[in-house]
Image: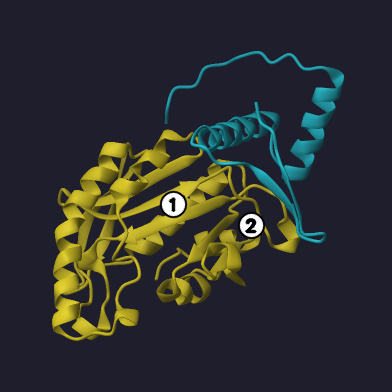
Chain colours: A cyan, B yellow
Amino acid sequence: MADKRTMTLNLTDAEMAALEQLCERKELTKTALIRQALRLYQAIDVRLAAGERLVFEDLRGKKKSEVMVL
Amino acid sequence: MDRPFEVQRRHDLEWVPAVMRVGLGEQDLEEIERSWRGGRQILRNALRAANVPRDKWPQSLHWNWEHKSSDLQLLETHACGIRIEGRWEAVVMTKVASYTARLAEQQGKPLVYVDYLEVAPWNWRIHELAQQGEYRGLGSVLFREAVQLSKDEQFHGRVGLHALAQAESFYRDVCGMTDLGPDGAKQNLRYFEFLPSQADSYLKDGGES
């Protein structure tokens, strides 16, 4: 397994609350969830850089909206 | 990293040493495709010579692991493969962030998505050519790796995949996955998923074909 390094993450109360809520919904530890978020951000970023768009589709209303990712 | 284990050779049922190599890189996938390219062409030629209808040809015959290798630049993508006597015999590529569970009981929870799984052309069972394949159970071994990865990632064994039509019965009947039906967003390939309980049963039962 690749060597791991440790970092400290400072979060606001709102951010920590969101993190804990996501952890409960996804059944992940905080570390696992942050790692997932990083993986997802990278995967999205690569595709945006390649000229693709990230779109959410409302299957009920059949509406689509573009997600802006910086 | 290499992990030794044994596989069974079909023609004499002898158990031979094999190695599971995890954490494959782009060069590994390129090497795999180079080593399988000739086998793919031999099969194409044999299928044509035997007048096998195109819809009966192996559905991964056109795959190219060189074309998939750049996906390994992403954190979420993993690949591992099986080597026997210095030759690549099977490979699987998985993703751990882009897909979430669809089964109602687990909806939205993370899972390991099996993006591609293939055994070497000489391991394919092709009835029309009376080819039985050299080694047994390689696909099962790799699928088991995906389930274990799901456990290691704290996804509790959740696995999802879209199956080629020729592989549907393997995932449904051998692995015991739940068939959620054709997915219009993926060329109508049928989507299969494991609940944690199904994954536990699979691992407990040995997960062999």
**Residue for badge 2:** B196
Tell me residue B115's x, y (percent): 46, 54
Question: Considering the numbered disc 2 on the image, is that residue within a helix, a strand or a loop?
Answer: helix
Q: Amino acid at mark 1?
A: Glu
- Image quarter where the N terminus of chain B lies is top left
What residue is at 57 percent from the left and 66 percent from the top? B191
* Label of residue B117 in the image: none
Marked residue chain, label 2: B
Whether residue B104 is visible: yes
Describe residue B82's horizontal placement relative to residue B208 as left or right: left
What residue is at 23 percent from the left and 77 percent from the top? B132
Tell me residue B94's x, y (percent): 46, 49
What residue is at 54 percent from the left and 42 percent from the top? B152
Q: Amino acid at mark 2?
A: Pro
Tell me residue B29's x, y (percent): 29, 45
Describe residue B130's horizontal placement relative to residue B63 as left or right: left
Describe residue A21's horizontal placement relative to residue B152 as left or right: right
Q: Residues within 10 Å of mark 2 (few under 14, many from 20)?
A: some
- Kindly indicate whether the residue at mark 1 contacts the one at mark 2 (C-beta within 8 angstroms): no
| Upstream in sequence: badge 2 or badge 1 | 1
What residue is at 58 percent from the left and 62 percent from the top? B185
Q: Residues within 10 Å of mark 1 (few under 14, many from 20)?
A: many
- Image quarter where the C terminus of chain B lies is bottom left
Q: Nearer the viewer, residue B104 or B183?
A: B183
Whether residue B204 is visible: no
Number of numbered discs visible in the structure rendering: 2
Marked residue chain, label 1: B
Tell me residue B186's x, y (percent): 54, 63
Q: Is residue B169 above or below residue B207?
A: below
**Residue for badge 1:** B145
Quarter of the rendering containing residue B194: bottom right
Distance CA(mark 2)–CA(mark 1) = 15 Å
